[in-house]
Image: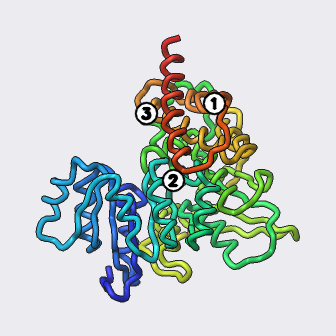
C-alpha cells in the first residue's frame, strides 16, 4: 500500500468488515496508487474494524453498536485513529470529506448513511443494492442536487456502466447475466429439500451469507433488475436476464444496428471495486486474471422462471417502481432470515415475497423517513405472515 496522506485519493469505507469491504481493503493495500483512508466503519465486528483501521492507516474508525465503544478504544489505544460509536457517529462520519466513499453496508439500513454521503457531493461506489431498490428515485434526486456521482459496484451493473461510459448512442436493450446459483437445473422436488447450508455453496462467487442465499433463490438477480432500472434509466422491457454459468460475461448492451457489446472479467469482485476506486482513470488491482483458453467455452441458458419465480416478481414491481420494490426487498430480508434459521423452506422464500406484494397497499411515499418507517412496519407484517403460516 502506498501511503501518501497529502497526495493520496481520499477514501471512506462504510462496512469495511463485510465481504466487499474486505475486498476494498485488499485492493487499496495491493494498489500502486496512493490512497488516504479517511473513515472505516462496521456494525458489530469491532476486532475486524480495529484491524482494518490500523492496516489502512485510517483517520477515523466508527462502530455502529455504541456498546462496543470501550472495546474499540482499547483495541486502538496508542494509535492516532479517532474512535467513535453509535448511529449518529456513523452519520457524522459520512460527512467527512473524501473523494470516493465505498458504501458496502448490507441491507436497507445503509439508506441513511448513504443519503448523508450523497449530500456531501462525493463520488460513491455503491455496493449496496437494497438502498437503490428501496429508494431509487430519492437517491437519484439527491445526487442530482448535490452533484454526487454514483458508481455501481455490482459486477453486472459495473460492466454495463463501463460499456456505456461516454457513449451517446441510445441502447435498445441491456442484458444482465446470472450464474444460476447452486441449484441451477434442480427440479421442484429437489428444491423442496434443500437447506441453507446447501444454498451457501455458490459455484463461482465468494460473497456474504445474505447475498449468497439471494443468489440461490434468484432474488438477488431480481434486485439487480430493479437496480438497473434506476441506474441506467431504461424501461423494464429493455432489461433482459440470461443464465451464464461461467460468470465471465457480466453484462451486455444491444444497439439498434444489431451491435452487441459485452463486459468480461473473472468472477472476482476486486475488478469492479478497483474500477470504482480509480474512476475515471484505471488502477491496478490484485485480481484474478481472465483466461479464456482455460474456460474453453461460454454457455448461456434461459432463466427457469417456474422453479425460480423471484425474477418475474421483480419485473412486476416495476409497474410501481417507487413502492413495490421496497416491499420486495423488505419481505425478502425477513423470509431469507427465516429460511437460514430453518423456519421455512427454500421455495417458501419467494412465496412470502409474493404474498407481501399482493397485500402491499401503500400510498405514495414522500421522504426517506417514511420509507424507513414502512420498512420497519412491513418487516413486522411479514414476520407475522410467516408465524401464521407455520402455525396453520
Measuring from the top left, give residue 110's x and y in whole percent.
46, 53
Q: Which residue is mark 3?
A: 340
Name above or below for residue 134 compared with residue 187.
Answer: below
Q: Residue at x 49, y 78 (%)?
A: 278
Q: Which mark is residue 204?
A: 2
Nearest to the eye among marks 1 and 3: give it: 3
Spatial CA span between label 2 and label 3: 21 Å
Spatial CA span between label 1 and label 3: 21 Å
Q: Which residue is mark 1?
A: 187
Instruction: Specify the quadrant that holds the N terminus.
Output: bottom left
Q: Residue at x 67, y 38 (%)?
A: 363
Q: Under tag 1, what secondary structure?
A: loop
Measuring from the top left, give residue 240's x and y in whole percent.
74, 53
Q: Earlier in the sequence, mark 2 or mark 3?
A: 2
Q: Which mark is residue 230?
A: none
Q: Under tag 2, what secondary structure?
A: loop
Amino acid at each position: 500500500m502506498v501511503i501518501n496522506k497529502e497526495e493520496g485519493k481520499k477514501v471512506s469505507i462504510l462496512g469495511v468488515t463485510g465481504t466487499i469491504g474486505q475486498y476494498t481493503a485488499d485492493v487499496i493495500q495491493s494498489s500502486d496508487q496512493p490512497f488516504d483512508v479517511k473513515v472505516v466503519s462496521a456494525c458489530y465486528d469491532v476486532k475486524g474494524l480495529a484491524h482494518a483501521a490500523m492496516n489502512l492507516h485510517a483517520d477515523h474508525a466508527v462502530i455502529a453498536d455504541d456498546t462496543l465503544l470501550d472495546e474499540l478504544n482499547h483495541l486502538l489505544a496508542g494509535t492516532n485513529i479517532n474512535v467513535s460509536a453509535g448511529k449518529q457517529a456513523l452519520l457524522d462520519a459520512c460527512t467527512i470529506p473524501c473523494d470516493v466513499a465505498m458504501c458496502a453496508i448490507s441491507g436497507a439500513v445503509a439508506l441513511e448513511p448513504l443519503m448523508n454521503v450523497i449530500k456531501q457531493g462525493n463520488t460513491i461506489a455503491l455496493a449496496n443494492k437494497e438502498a437503490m431498490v428501496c429508494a431509487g428515485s430519492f437517491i437519484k434526486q439527491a445526487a442530482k442536487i448535490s452533484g454526487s456521482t454514483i458508481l455501481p459496484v455490482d459486477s453486472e451493473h459495473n460492466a454495463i456502466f463501463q460499456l456505456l461510459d461516454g457513449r451517446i448512442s441510445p441502447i435498445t436493450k441491456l442484458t444482465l447475466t446470472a450464474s444460476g446459483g447452486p441449484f441451477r437445473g434442480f427440479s421442484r422436488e429437489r428444491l423442496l429439500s434443500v437447506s441453507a447450508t446447501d444454498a451457501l455453496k455458490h459455484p463461482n462467487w465468494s460473497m456474504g451469507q445474505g447475498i449468497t442465499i439471494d443468489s440461490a433463490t434468484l432474488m438477488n438477480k431480481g434486485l439487480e433488475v430493479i437496480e438497473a432500472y434506476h441506474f441506467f434509466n431504461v424501461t423494464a422491457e429493455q432489461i433482459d436476464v440470461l443464465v451464464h454459468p461461467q460468470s465471465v460475461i457480466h453484462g451486455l448492451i444491444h444497439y439498434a444496428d444489431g451491435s452487441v457489446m459485452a463486459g468480461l472479467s473473472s468472477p472476482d469482485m476486486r475488478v469492479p471495486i478497483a474500477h470504482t476506486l480509480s474512476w475515471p482513470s484505471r488502477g491496478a488491482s490484485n485480481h484474478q486474471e481472465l483466461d479464456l483458453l482455460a474456460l474453453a467455452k461460454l454457455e448461456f441458458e434461459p432463466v427457469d422462471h417456474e422453479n425460480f419465480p423471484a425474477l418475474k416478481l421483480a419485473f412486476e414491481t416495476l409497474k410501481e417502481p417507487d413502492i413495490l420494490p421496497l416491499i420486495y426487498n423488505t419481505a425478502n430480508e425477513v423470509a431469507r432470515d427465516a429460511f437460514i434459521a430453518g423456519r421455512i423452506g427454500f421455495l417458501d422464500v419467494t412465496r412470502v415475497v409474493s404474498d407481501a406484494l399482493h397485500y402491499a397497499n401503500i400510498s405514495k411515499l414522500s421522504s426517506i423517513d417514511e420509507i424507513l418507517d414502512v420498512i420497519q412496519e412491513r418487516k413486522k407484517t411479514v414476520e407475522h405472515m410467516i408465524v401464521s403460516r407455520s402455525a396453520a
